[in-house]
Image: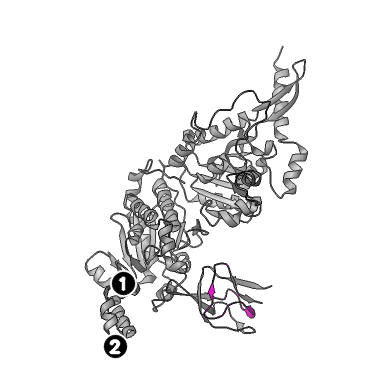
Amino acid sequence: MTWKDEVDDINRRRELASRQGGEQAIAAQHRKGRLTIRERIDALLDPETFQELGMGAGEAELGDDGALKDFSPANYVLGFGKIGGRMCLVGGEDFTLKGGSPSTAGLRKSVYTEKLAVKYRVPLIRLHEGAGGSVGAPKTKSLSAPVFEPHRFRSVGEALASVPVASAALGAVAGMPAARLVASHFSVMSTSTAQILIAGPAVVQRAMGEKKTKEELGGAGVHTKNGTVDNASEDETDAFVQIRRFLSYLPQHVWELPPVATCDDPADRREEALLDIVPRDRRRAFDMRKALVLIVDDGSFFEIGRGYGRSQITGLARMNGQPVGVWANDGRYLAGAMTADGAHKARRFIELCETFHLPILSFVDEPGFMIGSQAEKEATIRHGANAVLTAAMSSVPWASIMVRRSFGVAQAAHYGPDGYVLAWPSAETGALPVEGGVAVAFHREIAQAEDPDAKRRELEEMLAAKQSPFPRAEAFSVHELIDPRQTRPMLCRWVERIQPLLPQLLGPSGFPVRP
Amino acid sequence: MTTLIELETGGSVWKVLVKEGDDVTEGQTLFIMEVMKMEVPYDSPVTGRISALHIAEGDVAEEGQPAVEIG
């Protein structure tokens, strides 16, 4: 007597589970230009590295004789795999089954994925397409467990505090999957296939009387510009490429340092173009991204959150192989002023760097908080102070490069405690830019002058000279006044000097990342 | 193929340096916006001929608005 019958049963169940929602459901998924969850996982991971867990979860249909008639798998697929040769955990809803709305075992699998990532200390990747709970069929006898008991987001928060979490929206994502999506260190949305919704069109129309399509409610046009997701991807494949790239800068967990890559780009490379990249005409904006890519390791800049908070540029890069966080102002957008959403983006960026012990390079061209009635309505000062306090309480090493303007309270967000401060000759710094300040502080003198405009200009010129970085360097509040062409060599040397500090930072950050 | 340049941010159109039919080279400044007292130049991403100009000096324009078509 052997266990052959049972073994056959196990294999049969696995075979049925691999069929997912069946041929028709899979064909429908493909017709919409979307991959199935297993195809997604295969496209994301290094080839042949997926080790699936829990294929036997689901609902078996047995005949009168107790023999297996059919098997409907749980609609969540999870397992270990490798990205860039490093272990990670990946999970996602199976949209071909119940539209990804959680089945009992599917829900357990999704929560287990989070807990497993925390326990095994490996990056977590979620590939989302699915809805949250439904009101359920009238025939259902028992109530499903509420979202708060046990608290379903505890493991989500613990994962954020301990391992890199990257998520993708690949089809319609609503309810709990949507909340999980944004509770990530990096999220990306496929602009051609995904929508993110708290509630879909039918519910919205019923409750609000608002008639909108899924795309209008939660398409990429909405959510890549409001900070719901960090990045947009053209399609699913591009989303996987971005996730792989994002993870390449990060350690496996917070008890390990980010992986230093071999670097072919000379640390002492000087870029002539940096000498005149900042126009002498103070009113003229310039392309900060051009400067950034010239300074960091060639091809290493990966921008995060380009579509929102656009006066601030945030991303990851490498300096002589060392992963770093890069933050800069974009003077081309609202003069680079700190808006409420720019401050939110900056806070999340600093928290990401703090969590994974990434040194921060801050390229400062900050005119101050955004002003005006719209800015007041958006509570800019609260969001701005949040960013400032996050910087002030951070422990990772900072190097701040005063590229141009550094003004007001908002500038304080761009410098870390005991940071290394460099300034280009184009730097200007003070309480507020002279263009605003002179008109207020000298309004009587200007009004009484024969030619008020000329007087204002004269005062502006005189005061602008006082905002020069030279006195700051003399007073040692700027550590080095540098030739802009020396920026990369100086920063590469700094990265070498801070190496002894980094191991001391290991472990969970003092302030957790929150969406 | 036509290259469309859209406004990255709202503001007023301060200077337009090209007109329809002009040949332009990659990197050449086409027009300058004024946003929050800053001049924001828009440089041509390609070499080609201006086929349409949708903005004029003094216009108050919005983010995403088409500005110039080349090619």
Q: Which chain is mark 1 on?
A: A
Provide the residue designation for mark 1: A437
Under circle 1, the secondary element is: helix
Question: Magenta stretch: residue B55 in it?
Answer: yes
Q: Check residue A450 in the rendering and tell me which mark sits there, or answer none.
A: 2
The number of numbered discs placed on residues in the rendered structure image is 2
Do residues under tags 2 and 1 come within 8 Å of each other at their CB atoms? no
Chain containing mark 2: A
Q: Taking A92 as reference, is A304 above or below it?
A: below
Residue placed most toward the observer, A323 or A418: A418
- The picture places residue B63, in percent across and down from the top left corner, at 54, 67
Tell me the amino acid under the disc marked 2: Glu
Query: Secondary structure of the magenta portion, mostly?
Result: loop
Cα–Cα span, label 2 and label 1: 21 Å
Q: Which residue is drawn at 37% across and 52% down?
A: A386
Question: Would you say residue A30 sits in the magenta stretch?
Answer: no
- Residue A360's spot in the image, x, y percent? 38, 55
Task: Identify the residue shown where x is 32% and y is 82%.
Answer: A457
Give the residue displayed 42% in from the left and 42% down from the top.
A254
The x, y position of residue A49, in whole percent, is 61, 40
Indicate whether A448 appears above or below A273: below
Give the foreground label among 2 and 1: 2
Question: Where does the image place residue A138, in percent across and percent down from the top left?
Answer: 67, 28
Magenta stretch? B44-64
Query: For mark 2, does the 10 Å Cα neighbourhood hold few (<14), some (14 to 19), or many (20 or more) residues?
Result: few
Q: Mark 2: which secondary structure?
A: loop
